[in-house]
Image (tube, rainbow, N blue to C red):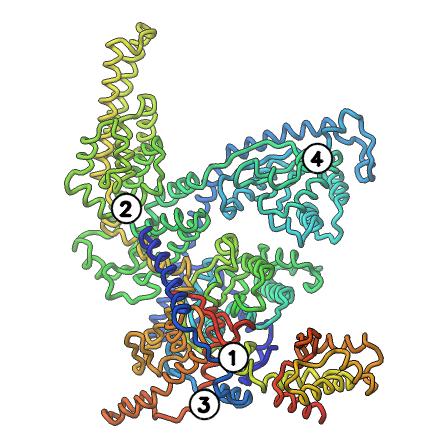
Amino acid sequence: MEPNEIEEDEFGFSRNYFLSKELGNSGKKSGRKLADIDIVEEQELREAMANMEQKHEKEIDELIKSYKSLYQEWVCELRCGFGLLMYGFGSKRTLLEDFATTALTEHSVVVINGYLQSINLKQVVITLAELLWDQVKTQQKTTSRSLVKDQQPFNTRSVDDLIAFLDGKNQDDSESFVCVLVHNIDGPGLRDSDTQQYLARIAACSNIRMVASIDHVNALLLWDKKMVHTQFNWYWHHVPTFAPYKVEAMFLPLILAQGGNSQNVKTATIVLQSLTPNAQSIFKALAEHQLAHPDEEGMPVNNLYTICRERFLVSSQITLNSHLTEFKDHELVKTRRDSDGQDCLYIPIPNEALEKIIKDISQ
Amino acid sequence: MATINPVVMDENSLQPFFVLHKGKQPPRKTFGKSKRRIDLSPKVPQKSNHGTEENLDCHEMCLQNFHFIWSKFEVIIKDFLRNINADVFEKIDCWICESFDAISSCKVSDPTQVTSSYPLLLPAIHHASSNQLFTGLVCTKNVEFVDDILTFKDLAQHLKSCGYHVGNLSSLDFSEKNGISGCLRNLLRQFLTVSIDAADISILASWYYEQDSYKNPIIVIIDGVERCCESVLSDFIMLLSEWAVKIPIIMIMGVTTTVDALRDILPSRTLQYLLPSQFVLESPTERMDTVLASVLIKHGTCFCLGHEVANFLRNYFLRQDGTLTSFIRALKMACVQHFILDPSGPANSGFQDKKYPHDLSYGAIALLQGRIIKQAFGLPSNLRNNQVEPDGDIGHDLSEMQKQCNLWSSLVMCIYEAGKYHKATLLDLYCEVLDPELYKSRTSGDQVELEIGSLTSNSHCLLGLHPCLDKCGSICQSIHGLRDLPAMELCQLLIKWGKLTEGISEVHEKIKELQSLVRSEDSVHLTKQPIDMSKRRTTRGNLNVEKDTTKLNEKAARLAACMVRKYVLPIECIPLHEVICFKNVDKLQSVLMGDPRTRIQIDLLESQKFLKCGCCRKSGSVSWPSLHDTSIMYCLAQEHGDLINLHDWFQSFKATIYQSSVRTKNRLKQSPSPKKRKSSGEPQKISEACIQARFCRAISELQITGLLRMPSKRRPDFVQRVAFGV
């Protein structure tokens, strides 16, 4: 890129930024609320989502199929020692798993679902080591050499040892490798820097090749130059699929259900049901007060304590406080000051929803 | 609160990881024995079985060629990089010997004391200096530590070969999380070759006495001290210094900036335990030139870069990445592209429709490997018809091309040698000699000669300013610089030129002539010198000598100019250059560094181009309702500022979707063609729930791509745009 182009790009970027800022500020900012939309029941929303017809299904299939002609190229790149990094809009799960099942049949393949919340990488490394060990064994059998004995079980070994094993010169054939397929290497479960360092160490092993996908526009920021150039050794491929992110979006809250009452009712009920009957009764006492006095800021703690004591729900202020802490942790109860400057407790749920909750937990 | 959408998932998609399949058979070994390695599914479109097999065989051959060439390059690069550091490594070696002697003089002689706890009873004179650590500070002159990983590995290997016990620690080991015990454990693992849970330095001490007993020192190399956690590093040094009396430990630390950097990192009480010595490595630019010279110029007959590719890599190195590692990686990618994946290669295309027969490059490589092309590849008979003379012999043509490349690389090196006196970098020179446009302008109007003729030796300042000269900077500077070269250096340069052009009849003779002229002049000098040595600068005779030297310089410059004009033609102007020259700059750029930020946005803004559907069109900012939902949403988002009101966004999304039913109705009235009706589908009443679900899905997808920041508590009704402009 010529310097002028770079400058132009930078200028373009800042210009766009300030223009959009201006657009946001100059025009009257829309004050309309999400709640103004007549949001359907969450259940209905989720059903609609499940039954949603996919647009351009045929074209998307065609697009994904069109990448099949590149499989051979990708295998070559892996065999030349590179890692493959796939990016572009759309879920790449189907594409990558199809690639692995059709073009990497000779190699063992382990898939990591990076879109999940927590992934135990040590377990992955143990599995990789076992797979590699299997390969070594088969190879040694075919070359009729004696097997290495006294093999310490992999699950008792340290990570450094396992990585050293994966990086060792186990194989006669330098092209024999185990493939790690990472969906969403930039996903929530893998996003922290320690995990990325760990993944980079795995990718750098001589007997491992990595194929990964990214979806986030800033995924590059996860890696430093050492990781990119010497460990992951990425060979980039732009493969937009436009396939829906069904599984990847599974754990994301729906924007229209998130603020909706139904969601709150559901989650609050689940939380309350998991609490002791006494705790539930305390919540009920507070709820009843709130429903009876809709105009008040809330219920002073002392009043609640008196009521609870009267009903033999708590025996001391400490017990009540521990229950309140629990409620606050789950955002079932909040505090605010009333006009007299007194701290009041209130439930941040609309009254109709609250009625439903009370009904639900009383059943 | 995480919620799970009621989508039917296969079991594996919810496993953190799973084994997709085990390798079915042990991968076959070596390539090139016409064995198929790549097992593609039958779903892959294949013309015929026979064709596919041939294709795969070719692919194997290509892979073999690639591995052959690249392994050669890799060895060359490694050797050159090692050689460039050889002097420094030697110096370090000597310094270690001296330091070890010094340490040995105050060693603990009683092995029972070694593992015993403190205090040791040492003679008072020893005590003061005995807990100081000899520390070699290796200045890398390079902020990019990634380039020096290999250097420190090489250094470790070099020192190991000298018999020392060497342990490598990286800055990652010195993290707060790892702590000092992590560093120690790592060291113990390297020396004892088993992992030990207890991080105790006494284990190292007893191991050392069992193994060595003061014959060789222990060397601890830490690359990039600037990136270490200061407190851990400081503790580590303190610990080693406590044990310095018992174990002869010598430290080597890599510093990227200056040796003073340590002062900023470590507290003074730690610094007093170090006895520093300084060593300086070559700068990245020098190393880059070495790699370039060794791979692309001296071995330019195997593989070389087109002008655009070279320019791209130069800019990538100078302006963007700045690491030699990435440059070498890019070279490897270019090699992979050229030898295996080039669309004109046999792996990917048929034998027809190509300007140049596809397997020429393999032919050329085969030639390099000492094979006979026709036997190895059975070149198709139409090979000659395309671009070689009808009755010519392809082998002959190829060897002609190789000859020309040889001449080219020798002469480029000659000019580089001349340019070295003026700090010209080979990278610039390389890009310049590859530029066909510059070559045309050079040859069209005898520009070089004109420029050289017009420049006086005092016009240095012009070089950087004159646009025309700046344009052909390095070559002109190098040639012009010859005029100012002192006689001694000119003489040395001519000797180098002589060596570089050995076996190249075209220029070697002329260089020899010049050399003999220099020699005869030298002898004249020598006879004159004793006579009027004292009045050297004032005598008339000496003025003549100077005049003669200038004449010689002039001649050398003219020779260089002539060489450039006649023989240093860009590779892309040499017939059959495709065989060895990689030119696909766009492909290289795309595989070297993806640009997710731009490309994902373009995917969304122009989804119809990728999906190639007949139903979506987009004119200006108006979104077509049949577009991918997320695409519609992102296009609509472009109309908002940095904050998007969710309500408004939803309404405009809804309007766009409903627009479809209205438009389709209208269109159906106008054109009752059954085809169109089919493509756009029957207008259906889209339920509110469906629209809301689609809206939610699109927002989730945009959230996954990171193009949106979700509503915060402070602004529950707004999302924030992250990217502005593609």
Q: Amino acid at mark 2?
A: Leu
For badge 1, the amino acid type reads Ile
Find the distance from the CA under tag 2 to the CA under tag 1: 56 Å
C-alpha span from label 3 to label 1: 15 Å
Q: Is residue B718 above or below residue B491?
A: below
Image position of B629 (left or right of B183): left
Q: Horizontal placement of B192 versus B171: left or right?
A: right
Disc number lying in front (2 or 1)? 1
Q: Give the image location of residue A345, x and y in percent.
A: 70, 78
Asked if the residue under mark 3 is in contact with the one under mark 4, i.e. CB atoms within 8 Å, the reply is no
Tell me whether circle 3 and circle 2 mark residues in contact (CB < 8 Å). no
Above or below for A215 versus B360 = below
Residue count near mark 4 (Cα–Cα under 10 Å), binned few <14, some 14–19, many ≥20: many
Q: Chain of mark 2?
A: B
Q: CA distance from mark 2 to mark 4?
A: 54 Å
Say what secondary structure mark 3 lies in: helix
Instruction: Name the residue carrying label 2.
Output: B434
Asked if the residue at tag 1 contacts the one at tag 3, i.e. Cβ–Cβ closer than 8 Å, the answer is no
Report in which chain the residue with disc 3 lies. B
Quarter occupied by residue B446: top left
Q: Give amino acid for label 4.
A: Pro
**Mark number, residue B688:** 3
Whether residue B201 is visible: yes
**Which residue is labeled 1 in the image?**
A255
Taking the spot 30% from the left edge, 77% from the top edge, the residue there is B618
Q: Position of residue B617 (x, y in %)?
A: 29, 79
Whole-angstrom CA distance, mark 3 to mark 2, is 63 Å
Nearer-N-terminus badge (3/2):
2
